Image (cartoon, grey):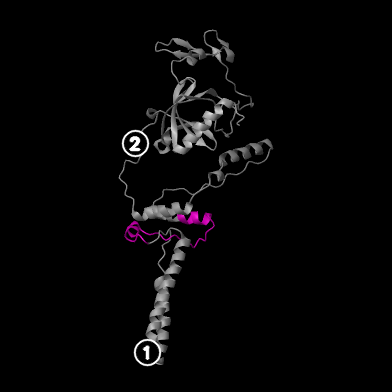
Amino acid sequence: MLHVRSIWNGAISFGLVSIPIKLVNATESHSISFRQIHTEDGGRIRYRKFCELEDREVTQGEIGKGYEDADGSIIPITDEDLSSLPIPTAKTIEIVAFVPADRIDPLQMDAAYYLQASGAPAAKPYTLLREALKRSNKVAIAKFALRGRERLGMLRVVGDAIAMHGLLWPDEVRAPEGVAPDTNVTVRDKELDLADALMDTLGEVDLEDLHDEYREAVEEVIAAKAAGEALPQAPEPAAGGKVLDLMAALENSVRAARESRGEEPGEHAEVKSLTQRKTARAAPKQTGGKKSASTAKKTAAKKTTASAKKSTAKSGQGTKKTASKSTASKSTEKKTAAKKATPRKRSA
């Protein structure tokens, strides 16, 4: 059970089934926060709240909410006013539909919450909804009210819990107008092949291995200043400049990625063009140096074996002199086959 303070108490409305739940944050921020200070003496800078009519500082208990009308007048709004709104979602997460998860645009994703069953009576209906979501391979779309506004939510199963992602309303997501390049650009097949080779070389990553290096660097600076030590030196920035040759940049990227993975610098990717992939469907996709080297060895072995069989068949029909010539020819054919079997490699 999560030992986190709930930020909202209510119920999930699943048809005629009501599931009492508590809403708790599913994420937490680990960013380092700073205080504002007076640079001359290090004194804290604080903000004080004043009433402009009485010209005095007021406490938090004296502060409420108000809506500014078009004429500048303020209409007071209390928490009681908001809690009695005539909508069903004021204290209820109302499920309105079940849809496939891929129907949800990631751009709509907002804050994430866990829905915690509130008390023993909620255990059975909570488990029922969780197992129904699992079996359907769908997510639930719901409406709920939080922090003064009605919102959309997406319910899905995470482990043994039900999580809810707040969703932006569709009209809150901007269209990507004017974002893509407005010039005509032609991408060559060879450039796509190298980009494909780079993607294969980089491969996948376990997200658990990624961490916030910026926060760690800030912590080192804070620790050094607190101890009166020299600050850690920043590494020299990489040489910049405009990339004029995209092919060279891609080739260098593949080489650098391969070296960072511990592969030999001499192992290059053999990049096959898109036209070759279409015409020779049986040919395997060769993007890694190790794969292309292995394929070359197998091809050489097959051709050498075939040449040896032909030479043996010819030598069995002639005399001893012919056999000796055949043996010499056999040796020559092996060398020729080995040369033919070694494909040209393109550095990627």
Question: At which x and y percent is residue 203?
Answer: 48, 51
User: In this rendering, would 248 be left or right of 216?
Assistant: left
Question: At which x and y percent is residue 12?
Answer: 49, 25
**Above-or-below relation of 68 to 99:** above
Mark positioned earlier in the residue sequence (1 or 2): 2
Residue found at x 38% / y 83%:
313
Out of 266 and 141, give the one closest to the viewer.
141
Task: Find residue 178 and name its label.
Answer: 2
Check residue 199 for magenta coloring. no
- Rate crowding at label 1 as few (under 14), some (14 to 19) or many (20 or more) other CA atoms within 10 Å: few
Out of 70 and 325, give the one closest to the viewer.
325
Q: Is residue 277 visible?
A: yes
Q: Is residue 163 visible?
A: no
Disc 2, SS: loop
Quadrant location, the C terminus: bottom left
- Rate crowding at label 2 as few (under 14), some (14 to 19) or many (20 or more) other CA atoms within 10 Å: few
Badge 1 is on which residue? 318
Q: Does the residue at mark 1 contact the one at mark 2 (Cβ under 8 Å)?
A: no
Residue found at x 36% / y 37%:
179
Tag 1: residue type? Gly
Magenta part of the chain: 254-282
Tag 2: residue type? Gly
**Above-or-below relation of 109 to 91:** below
How far apart marks 1 and 2 lie (CA) works out to: 79 Å
Select label 1 or label 2 by which is in front: 1
